[in-house]
Amino acid sequence: MRPSGRATDALRTIQIDTNVTMHAEGSVMIRCGNTHVLCAASVEENVPPFMRKSGLGWVTAEYGMLPRATTTRNRREATAGKQSGRTQEIQRLIGRSLRAGVDRVALGERQITVDCDVIQADGGTRCAAITGGWIAMRLAVNKLLAAGVIKNDPITSHVAAVSCGIWGGVPVLDLDYAEDSQAGTDANFVMTDGAGLIEVQGSAEGATFSRDEMNKLFDLAEKGVAELVAAQKAAVA
Amino acid sequence: MRPSGRATDALRTIQIDTNVTMHAEGSVMIRCGNTHVLCAASVEENVPPFMRKSGLGWVTAEYGMLPRATTTRNRREATAGKQSGRTQEIQRLIGRSLRAGVDRVALGERQITVDCDVIQADGGTRCAAITGGWIAMRLAVNKLLAAGVIKNDPITSHVAAVSCGIWGGVPVLDLDYAEDSQAGTDANFVMTDGAGLIEVQGSAEGATFSRDEMNKLFDLAEKGVAELVAAQKAAVA
Amino acid sequence: MRPSGRATDALRTIQIDTNVTMHAEGSVMIRCGNTHVLCAASVEENVPPFMRKSGLGWVTAEYGMLPRATTTRNRREATAGKQSGRTQEIQRLIGRSLRAGVDRVALGERQITVDCDVIQADGGTRCAAITGGWIAMRLAVNKLLAAGVIKNDPITSHVAAVSCGIWGGVPVLDLDYAEDSQAGTDANFVMTDGAGLIEVQGSAEGATFSRDEMNKLFDLAEKGVAELVAAQKAAVA
Amino acid sequence: MRPSGRATDALRTIQIDTNVTMHAEGSVMIRCGNTHVLCAASVEENVPPFMRKSGLGWVTAEYGMLPRATTTRNRREATAGKQSGRTQEIQRLIGRSLRAGVDRVALGERQITVDCDVIQADGGTRCAAITGGWIAMRLAVNKLLAAGVIKNDPITSHVAAVSCGIWGGVPVLDLDYAEDSQAGTDANFVMTDGAGLIEVQGSAEGATFSRDEMNKLFDLAEKGVAELVAAQKAAVA
Amino acid sequence: MRPSGRATDALRTIQIDTNVTMHAEGSVMIRCGNTHVLCAASVEENVPPFMRKSGLGWVTAEYGMLPRATTTRNRREATAGKQSGRTQEIQRLIGRSLRAGVDRVALGERQITVDCDVIQADGGTRCAAITGGWIAMRLAVNKLLAAGVIKNDPITSHVAAVSCGIWGGVPVLDLDYAEDSQAGTDANFVMTDGAGLIEVQGSAEGATFSRDEMNKLFDLAEKGVAELVAAQKAAVA
Amino acid sequence: MRPSGRATDALRTIQIDTNVTMHAEGSVMIRCGNTHVLCAASVEENVPPFMRKSGLGWVTAEYGMLPRATTTRNRREATAGKQSGRTQEIQRLIGRSLRAGVDRVALGERQITVDCDVIQADGGTRCAAITGGWIAMRLAVNKLLAAGVIKNDPITSHVAAVSCGIWGGVPVLDLDYAEDSQAGTDANFVMTDGAGLIEVQGSAEGATFSRDEMNKLFDLAEKGVAELVAAQKAAVA
């Protein structure tokens, strides 16, 4: 039995609230169990210098965690004077993932920045940030379409993410923090609604893992992402 | 008529939700109209190096703002590599204000850090942070008392804050962003429940102000803080 | 009896020497008792990027302290790699204060930077910096007027500052370091020659203070600023 | 035909020179085609603070690139004042990978730091760094064993890495820079000599990829890592 | 004729005022013509970590320049977030030079930090800092001797410095800024009262220089340092 | 007898390999005994902002050291977040030295950056960097001439450097690390092929040195630089 009491292939309860802040072009609070991430999409009518005159848009992401989102307080990165390697790694992943679902020609020369701030952490924050970040981006793009700023929908697919792992020798879906800290292997899967793979990151903790185990994690991830995509669809309907 | 439609001596609607995050010893979401600040108090069983063996406790605060808490996106301070002068000024004010309501001998050699993160900004964020931060601290101290870690309540008074200003020539209470950006004078008042003054910061914008005007702002502030203290009492009851 | 032996409403001896450095457009060494601040005004024929094409000028200030201006040596901020929160707070205050006495349209699109460097500290450095900084600015503007670079005097009023506090229960004017470190309340007042208020910052140290006490500090400040303005007039005559 | 003219399952020519610097406990220059990485292992008889008294050793890695290792000059990170997100991501990967092949109890409370500096870059630098870094670590540990500092060999398996990708629709092994910049998908595999998986990182560039494609990349990687492990064995024999 | 009108072997007028600040253990304002440097020596009863338990003392120096010490305003290094390469090079030179005149065993395990801050710059600031810094150190050591904190004088020789250069083809002593900016060669000499060499730094600007020219600069420097040492003796008498 | 067994006027064995990296316009590995420095020259068709429209080219240098180039591991400067004072001092010296051998008008408005990275250190790294850096620059300029990008050779002389010192009371040429750490005086000489002086930096370690000793070091340096220039000529022939 998993610490969470869930079936091996069960996601945590998902709660998605949209338009939760008044200023952002798109915003969402996504709650995957006790992991809560506030995602806000901002549209700017220009792109980074190296992309000007390219006719292409850009989507980027930033990730942060409130100091007391965690069990014990973490030092505020603004005070430390820099983002940690972990933070940078995560926000690069979120940005790459979201761009994979966007036609940058159709977006036109503008930038969407998706800020993903973890309000409460209980494992799987980067996956929740991707799944929620896509919704914030979707809502912001809807506004651009409604206003006639862009003509054709630049969003080409849903993008959602889930972590899987081998806990007590058993492959399980959607690790929470208690499970993650005991898991022998941890893998994050970012996929489209058509189960197209965007990113796969599997990492051994302690023991190595086999291709057979990796395949079982793939199976779980496909099930999980399908459910997350369904939740995205319900949220933006 | 103020842009907000409020009477000159009317606060914005206050909504206070306590225990909003699972990890912090005390937490609160305070909403003063459209200004929303999440305050989380963390207790650590040690104090900064320069205070060790003093027998005294310490209360400090950190302030942050999500990048899209504002009308247009602000650069993330962790990305910029440092906190702005404004941020540091505000968090120093919050810390001084909260310490003014604490008996540091009774607290004992431990530290309470109050993180105040602005989720949505519409003027008066530092005042909301002080008023909400006090509640988070109160809840954290309640836990220490309940657990018998400390014997005597170290909190000696309520601490709450409100801004006042001269808008269109008229002294008004609790400026929102639209009013603040047009106000000729802006003053922040931090007080105890007994109307004892902790901090007064008045600043001319454009024209100077007179002692008579300052006195009218004092009157408004006393009314406002009394109502905020009442809201604090209701929240922690 | 105050440690300094002064009457409760007596300023420290003021000594102002102008044109003390050969390069700055305006410079002054101001000595308020043992607090010595060197103020230098530099004129640049351009403004910060966000202000270009606005037709408005800008006045800004920077504050520093020599490492051994203090009783024990303080770490050099250039070595530490950043200005402290205190330094930033002070230089923002000086800049706001000086701008309050300037007509930025008459100044035209140019910037005056007032560097205030504390050579020796004995309390009240920020007030001395404002009072002396105004003189440096005045001298620099005089040169611009004499050279015909600007037509109409952009300086609309004197700006001077003084600190007051409650020492041993008694309101006193112009705290030196020994008094300041024992004072129960400390307030800084920035005013024009017409006693118009520009900034008021009162802060409790330990006990709170009352409106009545605040009013007594106001009275002292008005007397002190009037004398400081007289000294400014004598210096630039 | 691949730009490199290699068969789809052919590694680049590998050249490994050991003990190439006089100071490091273990050093190696690994050349995978035109990608040249100098790896140096340093042994320190203490561990980071959070690990003291744990009885466990630590292995960590740092990654750098000479400014002109690349086609056009890249800014030196020491001049920029920080390591890029990419650099931090890579060195975290190298460290995790090498630790996966080490019994930290057998290593004892000491630290091995493996510096991987890219002298010339032509794609696949992180994989070359892992494969070469393992050899540097192996050589350093051999010295510790020979000197009797540690009794039992803490290295439990070989660790080597290779990148695969889908180039022109075809899965190919060991991408060089020209291939990598055109590849639709890029995946890095870190494995042991027993084909145990340590890290798998697959990333879509442009189009998504399928599980079937991922499986073909797995097949190629197993072949490639087996050959790299053979080269490691030859080098340290 | 030199721009300054001085003879080729004439120093600028030297003015040395001692004990110019109330807090430092030793302080001096040295004026070499229009170059004015405030030097303050601070004694701390401990040494840097790597020197503890060595029985040896340490002398170090820091160098700064007020933003408007120069013809046009220079950016404040505390604002820039770091000391420039030039500043670090100079303060390392000052520290090495002063240490060359000190018996670190006799000094005992304490540190003297000499802060050299340029109030007004007109060429030769580093030389003035060394000559003045030695006096500040001498005064601070005198206090330690008078107080009986140290028994034997740790200062073994005078240390003074002067710059020479080839201006208009002619070797000249003690370049001011106007001369320095036109000089073809610039050399700094740090010597003891016995003409022992501590540092020699000659640098071509444009054309190279010959050994013969270098020898002529040596001759000038010996004359200049002898006069500076005499001025030091007069100042501390 | 010197630790190295060399005659007092003998250089270490010099080995120079050119074109050692595929991307740089000019590259060289210079080995002076056990000191190995990789020098790479990069040509960019623009100059720093302050030099635009001047018609003048620019030559600059950067210096780095691999963390384990030294006996014990040094902290990576990119991790430390800044270049040390020593590093900046050295790279400023290299840049000044190389510029002394270049006609910046003939070079035209383009920049050559010479990266000097120490692969293995055994004393004299800055001198090896200058001697090797000149060769890298020479090779890069040869390419510009061959391509007809520049018409007239901007390189006006060879530039080479060597250190000398007083070891055991005896002046010796080309100190290695063991000798340098025991030397009483250390001097670096940068010269042209015609023995024109570019930089002379002599520094006492412990005892001062005399003009007579300085002259003996000059003699040694002239001999050493002549041999280094011969080696440069052979390398670029």
Image (spheres, coloured by chain):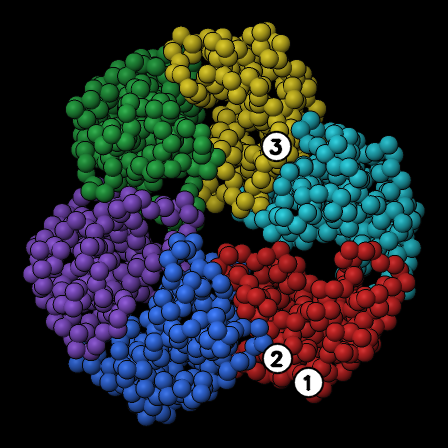
Chain colours: A green, B purple, C blue, D yellow, E red, F cyan
Helix, strand, or loop for circle 1? helix
Helix, strand, or loop for circle 3? loop
Which chain is home to disc 3? D
Observer-nearest residue: F4 or F39?
F39
Observer-nearest residue: D109 or C47?
C47
The answer to whether tags 3 and 2 share a subunit is no
For badge 1, the amino acid type reads: Ala
The image shows residue F71 at horizontal and vertical percentages of: 69, 42
Residue ID at (28%, 68%): B206
**Marks 1 and 2, how far apart at CA:** 9 Å
| Left or right of B132 in this view: E213 | right
For badge 2, the amino acid type reads: Val
Residue linked to disc 1: E235
The answer to whether tags 1 and 2 share a subunit is yes
Residue ID at (10%, 53%): B13
Give the mark nearest the N terminus, 1 or 2. 2
Marks 1, 3: nearer the viewer: 3
| Residue B125 in sight here | yes
Residue ID at (53%, 80%): C19
**Marks 3 and 2, how far apart at CA:** 52 Å
Residue linked to disc 2: E28
| Left or right of B179 in this view: B67 | right
Residue linked to disc 3: D72
Helix, strand, or loop for circle 2? strand
Quarter of the image where one finds residue A174: top left
The answer to whether tags 1 and 3 share a subunit is no
Residue F24 marker: none
| Left or right of A171 in this view: E22 | right
Which chain is home to disc 2? E
Quarter of the image where one finds residue D137: top right
| Disc 1 and disc 2 in contact, CB within 8 angstroms | yes
